[in-house]
Image (cartoon, helix red, strand yellow):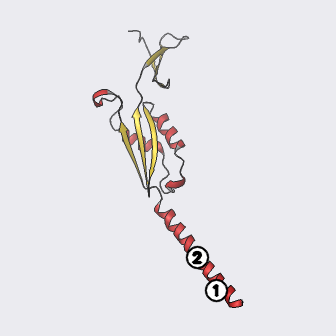
């Protein structure tokens, strides 16, 4: 009886150690190393209102946590940071690619509406189709 118990605990210990080792290796392999940005334009003939070098600005403003495991990352804060820093950028989605890549799909917000502030005649708000304020302009924009 004593021998079988000892054998059980040895096998159980080896199995647990193997599982812990596999989890450690898996966690090490899935740490975020690369973030790429893919741009999709909605305008005809690939025109864009976005500034040159916007893809680098998106990566910088995203504040991605390199080194954390991709599987458990929540990208909501990154999306908010990107859209706050770049008002003409809309983050469509962030996709995890195994083992350690995140891909950010962006499109541009197209100005559609111009609304004048009632209190001041020379203040205008530029809005997109989702009624997000893209820009605030001052001056005579009536023409």
Task: Give the secondary structure at mark 2.
Answer: helix
Question: Residue 106: image x %, image y %?
Answer: 41, 38
Of pointers 2 and 1, the one earlier in the residue sequence: 1
Identify whether 69 is placed above or below 48.
Answer: below
Q: Mark 1 highlights which residue?
A: 7
Query: Mark 2: few, some, or many residues within 10 Å (few <14, many ≥20)?
Result: few
User: How many marks are shown on the rendered structure?
Assistant: 2
Asked which quadrant contains residue 98, the reply is bottom left
Q: Residue at x 50, y 64 (%)?
A: 26
Q: Please tell me whether residue 125 is drawn above or below residue 2 in the rendered image.
A: above
Q: Secondary structure at mark 1?
A: helix
Q: Give the residue at x 48% y 35%.
A: 83
Between residues 130 and 10, which one lies in front from this camera angle?
10
User: For this rendering, which residue is in front, 32 or 96?
Assistant: 96
Between 49 and 17, the one lying in front of the other is 17
Residue at image position (38%, 44%) is: 37
- Quarter that holds the C terminus: top left
Residue sitting farthest toward the right: 1
- Name the spot of residue 25 as percent of width and height, x first: 49, 67
Point out residue 18 in the picture as x, y percentages from the top left corner: 55, 74
Which residue is labeled 2 in the image?
15
Q: Residue at x 58, y 76 (%)?
A: 15
Vertically, is 25 above or below 128? below
**Residue 53 placement, left or right of 112:** left
Crowding at label 1, few (<14), some or many (≥20) Cα neighbours within 10 Å? few
């Amino acid at each position: 009886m004593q021998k079988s118990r000892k054998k059980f605990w040895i096998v159980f210990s080896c199995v647990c150690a193997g599982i812990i080792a596999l989890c450690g290796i898996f966690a090490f392999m899935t740490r975020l190393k690369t973030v790429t940005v893919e741009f999709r334009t909605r305008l005809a003939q690939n025109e864009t209102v976005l500034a040159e070098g916007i893809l680098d600005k998106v990566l910088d403003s995203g504040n991605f946590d390199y080194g954390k495991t991709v599987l458990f990352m929540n990208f909501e804060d990154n999306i908010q940071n990107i859209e706050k820093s770049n008002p003409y950028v809309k983050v469509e989605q962030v996709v995890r690619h195994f083992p350690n890549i995140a891909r950010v799909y962006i499109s541009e917000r197209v100005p559609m509406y111009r609304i004048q502030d009632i209190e001041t005649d020379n203040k205008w708000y530029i809005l997109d189709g989702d009624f997000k304020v893209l820009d605030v302009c001052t001056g005579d924009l009536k023409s």
